[in-house]
Amino acid sequence: MCGLEAYADAAVGSLGIEHKKRTTIGVELAAKPKLLLFLDEPTSGLDSQSAWSIVSFLRNLADSGQAILCTIHQVFDRMLLLRRGGETVYFGDLGKKATTLINYFERNGSRKCLPDENPAEFMLDVIGAGATATSVINWHDVWLSSNEARKLQKEVDNIHTEGRNRPAIGETFTNEFATSWFTQTRLLFGRNAQAYWRDPTYLMAKIVLNIFGGLFIGFTFFKSKDTQQGSQNKLFAIFMATILSVPLSNQLQVPFLNTRSIYEIRERPSRMYSWTALITSQFLIEIPWNVFGSTLLFFCWYWTVGFHSSRAGYTYLMLGIIFPLYYTSIGQAVAAMAPNAEIAALLFSLLFSFVIMFNGVLQPFRQLHWWRWMYRLSPYSYLIEGLLGQAVGRQELRCSPVEYVKLNPPSGQTCGQYLEPFISSVGGYLTNSDATSDCNFCSVRTSDQWLGNNFNIFWHHRWRNVGLLCAYIIFNITCIYLFTYIFRIRTKSLLPSFKRSKKA
């Protein structure tokens, strides 16, 4: 009907003015106008051919039963002419070169229209609507007593009579929207996917950030060994990988807010689809791309740092799947309550600073004291514990030559005899137990000892951490819907009114 079949897969921004106007009309038709379709100057900015094409399109819609009210200053075939005060002077066909209109006025006492005179200027001059024109004839009374008015009134009466004689027609649609919620979500998901594909800058920035970040972190801590310093390097490699969630979350907030603005300005007033379908589609469209980006990050980062291949599965689950689900949900939850991208970035940075400061890396758990409740509240505490406990836990550590503690036992004792009580209580090992001098003592024997004593990280918590992070993700997704409803959908104040009601 809209004549846009040849442009079905084209971006709207690439269309010409005529086809953009056709698209706009089609969008309004899809929104099911209850009474009529209103258009303000639909032919403005068009050449004569395009204007005629648009008007012909509107004519076809009207002939199909769609009520249309539009203002237009170019081509039209019927006219309602009003004088001052809103009184009807003429309503009907214009005829070829406005001959029907001119004959009506000449037949009822007006002057003759000159051959080269503009019909529009003629009719305005005749009814006294020009700048200096006057008229002694009351053209409103002439219209009321004319055959044209009686014929028109008879046609209106016939329409009313025909309508009263027709049986009542029930509503075709009983729902608020034309399609089901699942259909709305599916179509919106496809629209968002197509928009991302047509404008690859956002996706390329996401992919490049993950690849570059993974390689940069990986080569910064390249092939870290199973020593105390190597384990410390692996800890910071994991910590820095999680820091990438800040720019990645800020990236996804921009398209989220842009799409929401389009919905609020145009598509929500037209009731094209539900806001919950929009939020769902925006969250779902981010998941495959963010998981893909985190997968690239994992492959560029994991083996470069020097983690063991036998432990890659769980680590990928946490970094390649749980991690993108978390930062996607928290980023959109913050954006849902922000009016623009700048405020969203500010709120996210403020929130993320607490998450990072109290996750047990920058300030170990045993040094937090009163702030330990923040450690337990931070989701990154469980993310880093899961990643580090799996990647480093349950393995033996060997001190490098510079990490050994050199000491001499008392006279008559070997290194093993002197340090055996200490090693039994706190751990560690000796490389020369039988020596009587220059004991080489390493303070840690296993990674679990080092992780538990210094960072409160335990290998056996790994599946508990997966469950807790899933709970955080579900909470964040709930907040996306809740904040959108509170800050963007709900119009009434959430606070109760404290004003006293006036007594009658």
Image: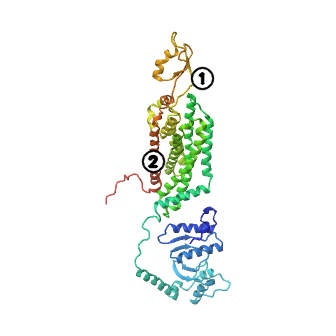
Where does the C terminus fall, quadrant-wise?
A: bottom left
- Above or below, 420 against 151 in this view is above
Observer-nearest of 430 and 20: 430
Measure how far apart labels 2 and 1 are at the Cα level.
48 Å
Tell me where residue 478 appears, x and y as whole percent.
45, 50
* Number of numbered labels in the structure image: 2
Observer-nearest of 395 and 75: 395
- Residue that mark 2 sits on: 474
Tell me where residue 154 appears, x and y as whole percent.
47, 86
Q: Dot 1, how many residues are within 10 Å of its Cα: few (below 14), some (14-19), or many (20+)?
A: few
- Could you say whether the residue bearing mark 1 is in a helix, strand or loop? helix
Question: In the figure, is residue 275 to the left or right of 96?
Answer: left
- Residue that mark 1 sits on: 401
N-terminal of the pair, mark 2 or mark 1, is 1
Three-letter amino acid code of the residue under disc 2: Ile
Can you tell which of label 2 and label 1 is closer to the viewer?
1
- Above or below, 153 against 50 in this view is below
